[in-house]
Image (cartoon, coloured by chain):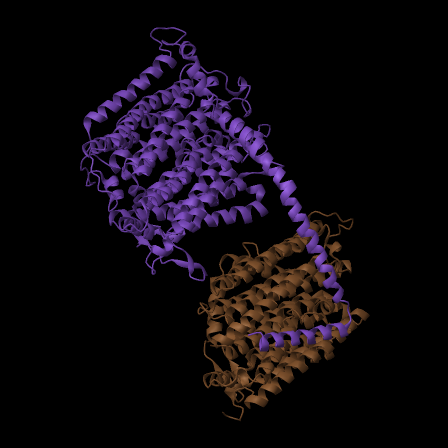
Chain colours: A purple, B brown
Amino acid sequence: MITEQLIWMIFILPLISFLICSLIIRQLFNNRSIFAGYVAILLIGLSFLISVLAFYEVIINHKQITTAPIEWLTIGQFTLSIGLLLDPLTIVMLTVVTGVSLMVQVYSLGYMKSSGQDSNNSEDPVELGQPVLARYFSYMSLFTASMLGLILASNIIQLFIFWELVGLCSYLLIGFWFHKPSAANAAKKAFLVTRLGDFGFLLGIMYLFSHQHLFPSDSNPLDIITINTYVPLLVNTGLISLTAITLISLGIFFGAMGKSGQFPLHTWLPDAMEGPTPVSALIHAATMVAAGVFLVARFFPIFEISEFTMTTVSLIGAITAIFAATMGLVSNDIKRVLAYSTVSQLGYMMLALGSGAYGAAIFHLFTHAFFKALLFLGSGSVNHSTGTFDMRFMGGLRKVMPITYVTFLIGGLSLAGIPPFSGFWSKDEILLNVFNHSANLNSDGQIWLSLISSITFALALVAVFMTAFYMFRALFMTFEGKFNGGSDQDPNAHAHGPVHLAESPKVMTIPMIILASVSILIGFFINPPFKIFGIDKHWLVETLQHGIVSLHTDFNITLAVISSIIAISGIALAALMYLKIPLINTQTTLISPNFVSKIFKPINTLFSRKYYFDELYEDLIVSSIFYKKIAKFLSWFDQNVVDFLINSIGWSTRNIGAPIKQMHNGQIQMYATITSLGILVITFFIVFGT
Amino acid sequence: MNSFITTDELLLIAPEISMVILATLVIILDLVIKNKSILNFVASFGLLVPIALSFNLLDGTSQFAFAGALRVDYFGVFFKIITLFATLITILISEKYSKKFDDYQGEYYALILISASGMMLLASSVEFITIYIALELSALPLAALITFIRIRSSAESGIKFMVLSALSSAILLYGMVLVYGFTGTTYIEDLSQIINRSLINSELTFGGGALLLGVILITCGFAFKISSAPFHMWAPDVYEGAPTPITAFLSVASKAAGFAVILRIVYSSFSNEQIGMDWSVLIATLSAISMTLGNLIAIQQTNIKRLFAYSTIAQAGYIMVGLAALSSLDGGQDNAGPAGILFYLFGYLLTNFAAFTVITLVSINTNSDSISSYSGLLKRSRLLTLIMTISMISLIGLPPSVGFMAKIYIFGSAMDTGLQWLAIFGVLNSVVSAFYYLKIVKIMLIDENENSEKIQLTTNMSLAGLSCVFGIVILGIFPGSIIEVAHRAVESII
């Protein structure tokens, strides 16, 4: 049913959309650029349908489809080929990317279009008198195509190319309002920080490739399946040392850290919220940032070999989860709260991977993509009516925007991990696996590793509390209480025209409703704790782990209750601090947020200044060390040593030519003489030379 | 071998025959028709016939014709197609230029076609007399074409070309006579057997030196065609004086034909390892001299056509790297070197013609060939600037262009055959060449020009330029198909 051609179409359709939007619509019909949106939605919709078909084919039949590699380049013995790899992991990602992308693009039709009706605002879709929709949809299509290419890549070089391409698209879209300096700076920051990670990834690839002679000669050492099959064998037989494989996997993980905003490369993600909100929903919540998790999952057999790498991954994941959550506690910008929450949830996924819970990580990636995209779309919808992202100037929107409120609430409950919403099931799976992992290590006698694992488990539980708290803090500040003026009051708001409190148009609310309905129960039905309606127990996780990890974890009711109680107490604290309860009829909440922040002032400042990481990177590392010391020295070296060399080479190059040029004097006798002399010299050389 | 001409044999040279018929047709039309602009149309569309006939011969079989004088194989047909494409683009970009010699347009196109038919014949010739005749058939019309503008410099170029190509023909003939005298054969194939036999019988290599001298002279004769150092001296003067489209034709088609014959001779005569090594060192040395000399002098040029003459000498040097990699046989079994030559020539065809499309138009518009007349080209025509920039990128060898792939391929073959020093030399030379290629880009994009009148492109010109640019980029990303064809071509002559 599903042919190779069809699978290629999944990737090619968005690419066609990109070409149409950028080469035809933007160049010729820019005044009717809304058509770019229709084209993009149509083609990505088709791509989504094929993905769903492929989902049935691959997942139901446990099939792994690889397409015949197409030879791209052959240089000597080295062949670079491109192909597609379709296994359960790919399929899950495909449905997430095409599905969320489709929803977000539909939403964008409303969000991007209506934000352009007033040409006085700075999120102005009219740039230099030109509508921006064609540019917007061409970037979005290019991003979707690159992301799909990344997921489908059957070979590590191909994967790296698309990895860089999604980075480029992220840069373009964060800086979409490039006339705003803050957006341009955020784009630059995102690009540079993720490049730092990519460099590690590239080093990992090169180090891996330097072992290519160890692979069987009929296999392609760049092919992902080959790597995952042979590297563990080669390590077992001692041909590749454990140190080497640790370095390789750490290199790959460094790339994943950059893309997924893991500590300490997390600084770019909150700033990336400068992009249009649908972009944040698609790229910086659901898909691209999850690429790091995908990457680790893709090379899981390699990661698994090295205990050191696995421990590092879980530790970084746990630190990121709690670290980002603390910053989310105090942020007043609704999008930034969501951004910190994304970083924190990605930390959870990394923690799961590091604890060997491959299936649970991807399960959480799957559910998270939907509810986080939903939350971002909700924040966009709120912004659409209030004109600001600052929650201090919102409030009381529940009655005005009922659909946004209900969908946001569903997303919030899911994120907080309240049963039966989808986030609960996947988060519970992760917590359970981490707990078991720690117990297993303990029974194996690896006390230290077990201790580290227990610490990560504790951190994860604390993060559950914080997640529930900041999420409902955001919810209450936005939707409850009374309205605080929106962009009219907010001095920093990029004014969005006069505040017009109303529900967003259908084209925006319908994608939110769809995503909300997915968020409610899919987590239960796709991975139920017991066999139900013909769906096997732990169906998704078992399918994903099929043939990779044989880890069995049954649903644990005690842990589920504990984590739910923790989450609910987080919500309760948020309610006490931010919800004005009408019964008591008071103007203040039970616990005053100002009071709390006064008590914990140093911590509050630390959190809201983001642990001074931006200052550390920019002032200390970049400015003091790099710029003032290293760059200064290099500049001196460049001016005095390199330039001297270059100038003298240049001088001699220019002047060596001159005497030879003299021989080309236009005299035919001269030319004939040199020709004849040339023959003599050559003859002499051949006859007597050897 | 059959001494009668059969229909089958005629079919094998159908592309050449149709070229000559087309040339005649153009001359006749020139006599009867007043509107000369139709000639360009007839010549370019008529070329589709030989192109189709050539593709028809591309069936992978090798057949002898005319008593073994011609060998129509994949290799020969590949070069025929290169020549035909070069001819087609030359005619397309001549559309405006040929108005300079309005009364002689018929002759102009006919001569191009006849010269091209000579080059096509050359690509299939495997016998010395046939090679010589085909060579003269291609060179004589060229001499006339070079003098076509009827001004002093053009005439001077023509005379220089004439005299020096006579000199090279004399060298070539002398070499052929020596070979015939010592072996009694004029067939390249027999030559290789005789050389191998003499080696087995441990006689003196090459019949005591005289045969060797013959082979050296033949090779030198063709080195003139490909403008390799030290036989390159004619190129700058001739390129400068010739009509611009003819300069392009010389730099691509003529060079390709020369490489075709050299490859055939080298493959059959030096297949022995010991001799191969000697030749490898020689060719590698000449290659290094060619590229260095070409690049160093090109830096100083102020005339775009002279600059391209030196650039073409340097490019010949790069292509000869593949020849050196062929001769040094250790590890070179996969024919990467010679296949690289074919691929490089194909890429060079696209790249150089893209550049010459622009050069022709600018020279018509500004009446000048000086590099400074390219200043501010960006404001005058964005399309021309784009074509020229991509062409320069490809000539330097930067991705994603066919020039990059060709250089990777050809330098890679040198690395595989133990000629690392030559590959490094080639890469260093590419860096030097970036100076003058990028200088042109800088002048086009940054320098100001008070003349900001738009340059109008004709359909033919933009078709030629854009298809070249398209080819440069596509082959720069997906070179596989042409590389495969090149490999098949090389395998057909082993």
> Is residue A544 visible to us here?
yes
Question: At 57% from the left edge and 84% from the top edge, which residue is drawn?
Answer: B211
Q: Quadrant of residue B345?
A: bottom right
Q: Quadrant of residue A550?
A: top left
Residue B122 percent across, percent down from the top left: 59, 79
Question: At 53% from the left edge and 77% from the top edge, which residue is drawn?
Answer: B264
Horizontally, is B410 left or right of A48 in the view? right
Residue B105 percent across, percent down from the top left: 73, 73
Q: Is residue A302 above or below residue B483?
A: above
Location of the C terminus of chain A by quadrant is: bottom right
Residue A151 percent across, percent down from the top left: 38, 46
In-front residue for pair B382/A609 = A609
Give the residue at the far bottom of this rendering. Answer: B3
Location of the N terminus of chain A by quadrant is: bottom left
In-front residue for pair B211/A59 = B211
Residue B366 percent across, percent down from the top left: 77, 58
> Is residue B222 visible to us here?
no
In-front residue for pair A179/A256 = A256
Q: Is residue B189 above or below residue A475?
A: below
Q: Quadrant of residue B399?
A: bottom right
Q: Is residue B122 above or below residue A395?
A: below
Horizontally, is B10 left or right of A48 in the view? right
Q: Is residue B455 above or below residue A457?
A: below
Q: How many marks?
A: 0
Horizontally, is B373 left or right of B120 in the view? right
